[in-house]
């Protein structure tokens, strides 16, 4: 009888340990899944922020490039106008001097 009681106690103890380990493993798995999901969400949010920052930097760079390009074109246009005006003025001056010589 004593042997049977010890055997029953050991079986009950092993079952209790097994149930506790199973429950602990379920708890660990639940916490792991929750942590993975939270980390996944945080990572996705961080990626969104980095992408938005990258797009803003690209946009700012493009604007600077366009402004630089437009300033270059403006300077080139002004130089052409200056040269054209100078040449036109010189030709008109020569014409006016030439017409004076005829008189």
Image (cartoon, rainbow, N blue to C red):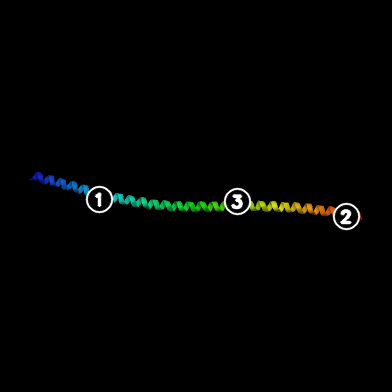
Q: Residue tagged by mark 1?
A: 23
| Residue furthest out toward the left | 1
Q: Secondary structure at mark 2?
A: helix
Question: Disc 2 to disc 3, how far (Cα)?
Answer: 50 Å
Whole-percent x, y for residue 60 in the image: 56, 53
Q: Are marks 3 and 1 in contact (CB under 8 Å)?
A: no
Residue 70 circle label: none
Residue 99 circle label: 2
Whole-percent x, y for residue 39 in the image: 38, 51
Residue in view at x 76 percent, y 52 percent: 84
Q: Earlier in the sequence, mark 2 or mark 1?
A: 1
Whole-percent x, y for residue 40 in the image: 39, 51
Q: Secondary structure at mark 3?
A: helix
Q: Residue tagged by mark 3?
A: 65
Question: Disc 2 to disc 1, how far (Cα)?
Answer: 112 Å
86 horizontally vs 12: left or right: right
Q: Are marks 2 and 1 in contact (CB under 8 Å)?
A: no
Residue in view at x 51 percent, y 51 percent: 54
Q: Secondary structure at mark 1?
A: helix
Q: Earlier in the sequence, mark 3 or mark 1?
A: 1
42 horizontally vs 86: left or right: left
Of residues 95 and 3, the one nearer the viewer is 95
Q: Are marks 2 and 3 in contact (CB under 8 Å)?
A: no
Locate the C terminus by quadrant: bottom right
Question: Disc 3 to disc 1, how far (Cα)?
Answer: 62 Å
Residue in view at x 63 percent, y 51 percent: 69
61 horizontally vs 22: left or right: right
């Amino acid at each position: 009888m004593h042997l049977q009681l010890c055997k029953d106690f050991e079986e009950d103890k092993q079952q209790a340990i097994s149930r506790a380990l199973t429950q602990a493993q379920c708890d660990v798995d639940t916490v792991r899944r929750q942590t993975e999901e939270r980390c996944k969400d945080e990572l996705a949010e961080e990626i969104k922020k980095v992408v938005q920052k990258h797009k803003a930097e690209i946009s700012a760079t493009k604007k600077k490039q366009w402004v630089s390009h437009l300033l270059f074109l403006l300077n080139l246009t002004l130089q052409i106008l200056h040269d054209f005006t100078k040449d036109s003025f010189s030709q008109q001056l020569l014409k006016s001097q030439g017409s004076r010589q005829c008189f």
